[in-house]
Image (tube, coloured by chain):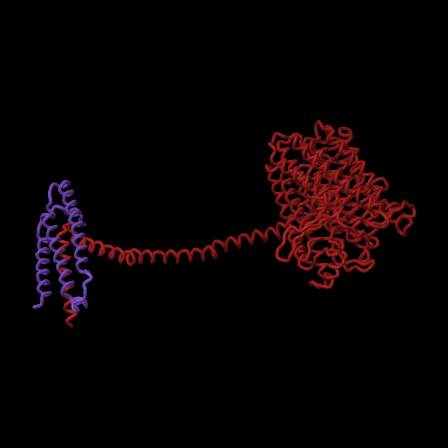
Amino acid sequence: MQETISFTPQLGASAITGMLWLIPAVPIVASGVIAVLKQPKRKSASTLAIGALAFSLLLSLIAFGHVLSGWSHGQAVRETANFTWLQFGTTNVDLGWVLDPLSAVMLVMVTFVGLLIFIYSTGYMAQDENYTRFFCFLSLFAGGMLGVVIANSILLLFMSWEIVGLASYLLIGFWYLKPSAVAAANKAFLTTRVGDVFFLLGIVWLFSQTGTLLFYNGGAGSIEANALMALLHQHAALGLSAAGAIGLLIFAGAAGKSGQFPLHVWLPDAMEGPTPVSALIHAATMVAAGVYLIARVYPLMQAGALTGGTTTALTVVTWVGAFTAVFAALIAVAQNDIKRILAYSTVSQLGYMMAGLGMGGVAVGMFHLITHAFFKALLFMGAGSVIHGCHEEQDIRRMGGLKSDMPATFVTYSIGMLALCGFPLLFSGFWSKDGILEAAQHFSVSKVPFYMLVFGALLTAFYMTRQVSYVFFGVNRGAKNAHESPRAMTVPLAILAFFAMALGLIGTPAWPWFRGFLEGHSVNFEWSGFNEPGLLALMATSTVVVLLGLVLGWRLYGDNTPRPDESDVLERAMPLPWKWLHDRLYMDELYGMTVIAFYGWWAKVADWLDRRVWGGAVGAVAWAFGLWAQLNRFLDTNVVDGSFDKGCEELSTGGGLLSRMQSGRVQTYLRLLALAVVALAAILIWSSRA
Amino acid sequence: MNPLTGYLLVAALLFAIGLAGALTRRNAILVLIGIELMLNAANLNLIAFWRYGPHPQALTGQPDPLTGMMFAIFSIAVAAAEAAVGLGLVIQIHRHAHTTDLDAMNRMKG
């Protein structure tokens, strides 16, 4: 288990932390500006997006340098800048950002990989009519992800998280004239929404218990020791503490974004978007958000663990991760779409990261996240280059023999593939995967995850060999006039290929720089790092497993990949399991028959209720009021109006009679006056007599 | 029969003649004359009550403050003004309608 990390106490935020908000803000503002640009302003749109992200990269590097310079004497930097956003009565809604090794590493990774993908997009999307819109969404996506990374407030994190969700929806459905793209966009949005509901519940629970939205706030934050002690002493259902239950809810949100079983179904379909989007979603941003979230709230997940022990929440994370890793790798074996294979491999690798987080702590999971971001971006962009070169062909059965047509793509793709497989020593994937396997070996609960992950590694090597054989070796089976891609696409590939190899150096057992950086203890280069008991044996095992997968794949496919009309080697050997795997183990069908069928049925029930019950009730009320209105009208016309009219008529008749008296003759009036005086006099005299 | 009753009877007679004239004559000038008669009947009453009325000064023979006399003089002055206005109106009516017949002046009716 991870040791307790000591961080330098925060003495007010430095200027760099204060300016940290610029990193996500600049791409988001750029996205807003691009949104109001006219469609033909292609050049300015891409320049603006790339410029904004390059600026963010620069700021990220400065922030990274700041963290690096503060890392000494077994201490790590953690600086926050918090402010109150809203105030309801005595409740403060706080936002803020945090600069610590975790966020610094992620910032550099996201901006760097994102920038390469942006540059690559200028080549890939060059023919697209909606180039401007594409860069608008891309920039928003990157900005949202950077917001997730810097957030020190779970509310700010959630808001950025939703920006990422929105942007992914827009980008997956970018070619909105394709019905499948629209369906995939909806599926991604709705599936992640399932996780987000749990996430939101977790946020509300955490807020209600700790009274603060901030992660770190000089001892008063929600994942600092005081709050965690309080959470541990509260009991939720099923023997979980409140900390464990909130951790599980947050993990459900992370599982939705990071494509963990059973919420992984959207991820393979997200291939419907343009390939740079797939690279961005699968490597740098969206799926990394879930893993990063778990790393960010790791103290919460880990709360209550004894030394060398684990918690319920982490055990769940481990099991889900390990299961997803094997499950997705199995499906990837039997897919024929070049991007779909990579998508399932992403799901599988995310399972590794989750398992790594669950068993080995933040450094193990995050190291795999970073290395994976580089080689998976490389693979996706390589796949995009292949698709581009083959005139939008995505079926690997109709490719083949491309290694001579597209040499640069072939070399870089192979590097990415070997890194993903975890080819020994030279490639980063080997070291990061080894870290996870080592953690799994020491996992106290069960050894099963270890075997699952080893099996997953075998499958990974196998399906990647199969894919590369299909695409680059053998004879060309249909891709006419395949051509190498432009420089805007191959140069980013080369840069990523370099990092896919070089990044491994910062995480070897001899020089665990990455772990030291994240955990804040000093690191020395010493060969004795390899002398830990069982480590060499483990490395040997993993090497053997990878080689076995590669050899097996090469023997089965190699230069003899079948023609499009022939069936796969494995399909001939075992048709039934092949069909299951090819149909993605019927997860979509299962959801179609359960969740979606239930919603369909429920919608019908609701419709019936609406029409018959509520509609009937409303209709009856309306009818009763209609009747009442009829009665009122009758009363009005015949009683009220009648009497009023009658009164008016009487008044008019009386007025007519009186007006006749007014003859205009002065003497008549005088006579009346005289008579009245006489009468008055008579009355007065009469009454005085009495 | 004390002197007051005699004066009052004369005044009443005068008033009745004036009223009859005002009510029955058609000529506007004659109606005005009738009104003047009624006014003077009232003046006669004022003087009579001043001289013989039941007020303390009349009974005790105290020096008289000329109240009734002044009242009558005011009344005559008002009557003169009224006659002037009335005759002015009659002249205007005559110019307007070429008649002084009151029955023809009936346009103010409902």
Residue closest to the far top = A481
Question: How many discs mark residues in the rendered view?
Answer: 0
Q: In this view, does A344 lie to the left or right of A675?
A: right
Residue B53 to residue A190: above or below: below
Chain painted red = A
Residue A576 in sight = no
Q: Which of A491 and B90 is in front in this view?
A: B90
Q: Nearer the viewer, residue A166 or A411?
A: A166
Where residue A550 sits: x, y (%)? 81, 41
Colour assignment, chain B: purple
Residue A269 in sight = yes
Quarter where residue A559 is shown? top right
Q: In this view, does A549 lie to the left or right of A96?
A: right
Residue at 13 percent across and 65 percent down: it is B52
Where residue A72 sits: x, y (%)? 85, 47
Where residue A438 sits: x, y (%)? 84, 50
Residue closest to the far bottom = A690
Quadrant where the N terminus of chain B sits is bottom left
Q: Nearer the viewer, residue B3 or A155?
A: B3
Where residue A261 sits: x, y (%)? 70, 50
Q: Is residue A689 left or right of residue A296?
A: left
Q: Nearer the viewer, residue A451 or A250?
A: A250
